[in-house]
Amino acid sequence: NAGVTQTPKFRVLKTGQSMTLLCAQDMNHEYMYWYRQDPGMGLRLIHYSVGEGTTAKGEVPDGYNVSRLKKQNFLLGLESAAPSQTSVYFCASSPGSPTEAFFGQGTRLTVV
Amino acid sequence: GENVEQHPSTLSVQEGDSAVIKCTYSDSASNYFPWYKQELGKGPQLIIDIRSNVGEKKDQRIAVTLNKTAKHFSLHITETQPEDSAVYFCAAVGSIKIIFGKGTRLHILP
């Protein structure tokens, strides 16, 4: 069982470069989330989606865009990376709310 | 906006002793309170949860209590073991968004 898979696991970007993080889930979950984890800050919600074709902003959406063209995939984009976006990014999915969310293994992104 | 406060940020206990982590939340609409454990290099994993119509729930060595009036909920781990060393997150869920506390790093001392 794959569960929630994040691609890539590690990435180093130069300031100003763009990239897309991919999250894929095989559990037919409706809800998907993107979080960033920074030391001492816990998990902060960037964007979320309650179904295919829908997205919404979380606590810290600035500098990020998302898309949910297919139910199983939730993409997180950085158009022009900044050092402040150096973080570990986690994707999660849930069959609905409120109930358990399942997390991916994370993507460690460094912006230099 | 919604906020979850979690204390302490770091906790060290002797193996075999109990550990308690406390959280408070601000959104009165929150009705589901999960606890996640995160081991090094991994994503958070659910260990126990409680819904607003229940005051306490227990699963072997771990238990969670909820006081909706005071907007407090707590995680209790008894007879701690080395494998309990990890970062623990509380969260509060209302309609859609899962809002996490900042986490507690639990160290189990030999």
Image: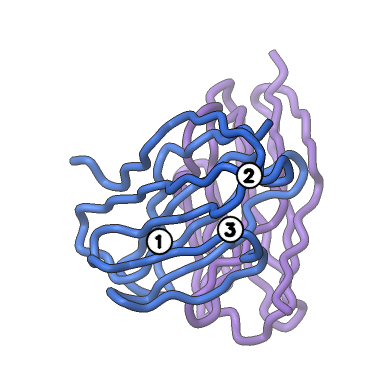
- Residue wearing tag 1: A100
- Give the residue at x 56% y 29%: A12
Determine whether the residue tagged by mark 1 lies in a helix, strand or loop: loop
Q: For the residue marked with disc 3, what is the amino acid?
A: Val
Alpha carbon separation for disc pair 3 and 2 = 45 Å
Q: Position of residue A86 (x, y in %)?
A: 66, 39
User: Helix, strand, or loop for circle 2?
Assistant: loop
Q: Which residue is mark 3?
A: B64
Q: What residue is pinned by disc 2?
A: A16
Q: Is residue A44 above or below residue B95?
A: above
The chain carrying label 3 is B
Earlier along the polypeptide chain: callout 1 or callout 2? 2
| Residue shown at 67% from the left, 22% from the top | B15
From the top left corner, tell me how far across and down residue A60 is, in percent: 66, 64
- Amino acid identity at mark 1: Glu
Q: Mark 1 and mark 2, same subunit? A: yes
